[in-house]
Image: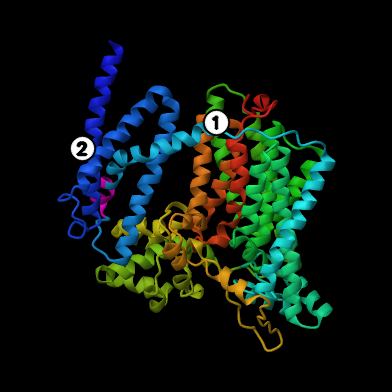
Amino acid sequence: MVEIESEKMKMWMKAVAAVCMVAAFSGIIKVYGLENVIFFNKGIISLGAFLLGAAAAGKAWDGWRQNRRTFVIGYLMAYGLVFSEILGTAMRLEVTRGGVNLRISGALFMAGASVALALLVAPFFMTMIDFSIEPGREYGDEHRLNKVFLVVWGILFVGYFPCILAFYPGLYNNDMIWQWLQFDSWSFTTHHPLIHTLFSGAVIELGKILGGSYNNGIFLHSLVQTFLFTGAIAYGIRFMVKRRMNRIGVILVGLFFLLFPFFPVMGISTTKDTIFAGLFLITFVDICDMAAEGQFYRGRRLVLFLMNGVLMCLFRNNAIYGLAVMVCCLMIFWVILRARNRNRGFLLKAAGIAMVCILLSQIMFMALERGLHAEKGSKAEMLSLPMQQMARSYVYHQEEFSKEDREALLRFFDEASLLQYTYYLSDPVKNGLDMEKFQVFDFVRLWVRLGRQFPGEYVLSPLYNTMGLWYMGGDSSCYVEYKMLPPFDQEHVVEERSKLPWLKEYYTWFTDGNLQKFLPGLSIFFYTSFYSWCVVLAAGILIAKRRYEYLVLPLFLGCYGFSLVFGPCVTVRYFLAVMMCVPILAVVVFQKVLGGDEDADFLG
């Protein structure tokens, strides 16, 4: 009798879901403004959507009956992904062709339609929750692990060397033109990490002394940075071997780090993000190790961990903000657990260690700042989000501005810079901010006043600016700089002299246009949003498997990613650190629990 009632319920659910699926597809086409382009309601494709909805609902029902916890978590992750893709596509269509309903009604319909459409994706997430990897054989002693580390390090360094030759002497780009000038003039600002300015400037000058030219200086910088970068990756693979990852898995991850084109290119780029990413990876691996062992480092290992964490913060200014957000989250969880009378010692210890890293890094930063007599960096760097909101409001609603608000806005910004507003990058607007006329309270009052008048633009602006964190439809988040900067004077000249032009053409092929045009499906791995969703997936799987002690891993990555919300854009160099950590995170999440790990529950 129970089975008969269950089958009836299943049939009703399939019928309702099928109708909702057709309505969802039809309605989204209307929201996109494509009803006169895609004749969904007139074609047999609507019948296909009906059948697809029925099949998806049936599979969902079976999943619910088998494991409700797995189904709920898998469905919630599916809903988040589907809604973000529908919303992101709408926003991109509005940029490219217009006519999209991005008002509250359109957003609510997209959110509602995602309820039905998520049924199509939920089985994938449920499968991922149940997926696991059998551990390999025992790793042996510390001596063998160190041998693996050195061998992998050597292979990666040699494997990256052709990239150095392809872009010989290296990639002098991004912010190095200003940092090198600061080092040469010994006149510093905190706009860029001081420790990186000192490191890069010293290496380049040493290379010039040893080799007689600044080309050799950049070449030495490429060698040293690649050496450090590949060492950090080798440290991650060493951890995989320690955790008894099977040989095929180790080889696949190793090949990913070796052959994924963005990694060797970033290895020779003069951006601060490369060394930071290596330090971030080492920190993450150590956190994984402590989580797996069920205890924090002590003594010398703790000191080394803190030293690496401090260096990580010094090489990237927003790393401190990521740690600060993480501390806040840990304390919120502590309060929740305390209310439930559960062991919360781990959370306090983790928050304490993070706070020590923040404190020590700030002390070191202030020592560098005073020792070098560095000037404070521009406050404009912290205002990317509100500047974009105000500029977008002005561009799209200029005629609605009152005379008072327009005059107030133009006191802060050059009008030409406002009109150069770009949805994915704040630099054009930021460059037009007049810091001499900047007054915090006046700026905030204007920002609040415009927000009340144009709330829609204030919501859309940060969503557009951070699409690289949440939308996998493809945007500028795959951007990598391949061009050399011009010299800042006649003496400090660096010229590109590629030794392998054909290989340079291969690396520079990986641009947004080529990826979307020639690599359907595979292009997804080149966009930062894919790695954001990997972190979300990992958190969902850990919750589904009740491995709460490991949630600190996606929390660490997620908090750093959140700090980018307030930055100028989301590109590969900003998200490189998380991209490098995702394969290691996958090992922890998908590998079957090793003997002894059952007791490694920090939460008691």
Q: Residues within 10 Å of mark 1 (few under 14, many from 20)?
A: some
Q: Which residue is mark 2?
A: 19
* Image quadrant where residue 188 sits: bottom right
Q: Where residue 205 appears, x then y in whole percent?
A: 78, 76
Local SS, label 1: helix
Residue at position x 30%, y 32% in the image: 57
Does 453 lie within the magenta span?
no
First of labels 2, 1 by sequence position: 2
Q: Which residue is mark 1?
A: 335
Q: Where residue 427 appears, x then y in whole percent?
A: 48, 70
* Discs 2/1, front: 2
Task: List the single residue furthest toward the left.
Answer: 42
Local SS, label 2: helix
Between residues 568 and 148, which one lies in front from this camera angle?
148
Res 370 visible: yes
Q: Quadrant of the C terminus?
A: top right
Q: Which residues are magenta?
A: 103-109
Q: Are marks 2 and 1 in contact (CB under 8 Å)?
A: no
Direction from residue 93 to residue 569 in the image, left or right = right
Q: Where residue 287 appears, x then y in whole percent?
A: 67, 41
Between residues 315 and 471, which one lies in front from this camera angle?
471
Res 179 visible: no
Does 107 lie within the magenta span?
yes
Residue at position x 78%, y 52% in the image: 151
Disc tally is 2
Residue at position x 67%, y 39% in the image: 245
Which label is found at residue 415?
A: none
